[in-house]
Image (tube, helix red, strand yellow):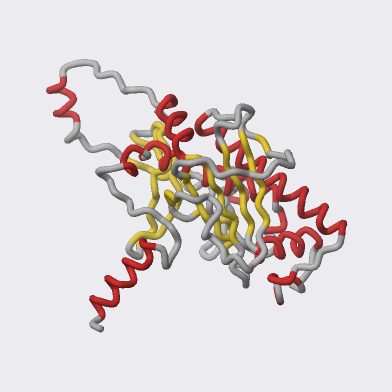
Amino acid sequence: MTPTAAAELGERQFYEGAGPQIKRLDLTGRERQLRSAVLAMEKIAAAFARAARRSMPFLLRYKAQIVPSRVEVVADPGGPTYSANIPTLTIHITSADARARGSVTLNADAIAFIIEGALGGRGAFWRNPQALDMTIPQRALLSRITGSLALDFCAAIKQEVGIELAEDTSDTEQVTQPGDYLRVTCALDGLPVSATIALTIGAEIIESAAREQETPEPVHGDPRLQEALKDCALTVVAELGRVSLGVGRVLSLKVGDVIRLPTATDDPIAVRIGGVEKLTGVPIVSRGQLSVEIRSRQG
């Protein structure tokens, strides 16, 4: 079999059932209609990643970060993110009218990391996360932290699209509603294990709410003048952070000194156009160069 044929076979198996059931991104069909929902989910995942650092303060001790993946459009929110024979923990969230449903799912490595991190351990659970044997206090601690993560997800959804959700504490069996779901898998980067937290939410309810948040930009003035202004050059500045130093400290600065900024590596940064803050972005590396990926617009 030629490399080209093997690649085509692998791609076909991936989309036809041998791999995760992720739909092709067809910009002329259903996925195009979900564009607003996908963009909103990206912002929701970024907000969750920031909030989850407060729910898991021990991330700092391990020098780990929460890194969201690309948004996936899936038909089944429950799988197959993880193998069926590996333990996971899922917290379901729902709106008061049950129209909006979602979930936060931790894989075995994430469960082990939370227990180890919260108790100040050194990695005993990491040796065999598939056979987690927790005591009652450990289970209670895990439940408290995962409940906080679910609240972080709910708060991010409300902040971005205005939908109020809460943890579903009912004992009724969860039934998957028909329709598309959006999923983002957040990796706990920097750990010796593959710890991940998967976020899922119904796509249609997010799309509807995201469209309601959008406001059309009014067009004012002569359109010919607007077209001419497009060629004008503007200075764009991405501000990584600001810090105040005393005069004495400034005068004592020398080559090799390090000035620590209050901004974390995954915090949003302000992008100023003509001296006015207009955009929000995050620092990334693109083609070997330090770059800024635009995440939101201020107005």
Q: Which residue occupies 86% across, 62% down?
A: 135
Q: Residue furthest top?
A: 221
Q: Let me know if residue 284 appears in the view.
A: yes
Residue 133: which quarter of the image? Answer: bottom right
Q: Position of residue 245 (x, y in %)?
A: 60, 46
Q: In front: 15, or 60? A: 15
Q: Position of residue 130 (x, y in %)?
A: 69, 71
Q: Which residue occupies 77% across, 48% down?
A: 144
Residue 215: which quarter of the image? Answer: top left
Q: In front: 284, or 105? A: 105
Instruction: Give the side of residue 22 with respect to residue 99, left or right.
Output: left
Q: Which residue occupies 36% across, 62% down?
A: 16
Vertical arrangement, residue 177 with respect to residue 25, above or below: above
Instruction: Give the side of residue 206 with respect to residue 197, left or right.
Output: left
Instruction: Give the side of residue 189 with respect to residue 221, left or right.
Output: right
Vertical arrangement, residue 11 with respect to residue 141, above or below: below
Instruction: Give the side of residue 61 with respect to residue 287, left or right.
Output: right
Q: Let me know if residue 252 appears in the view.
A: no
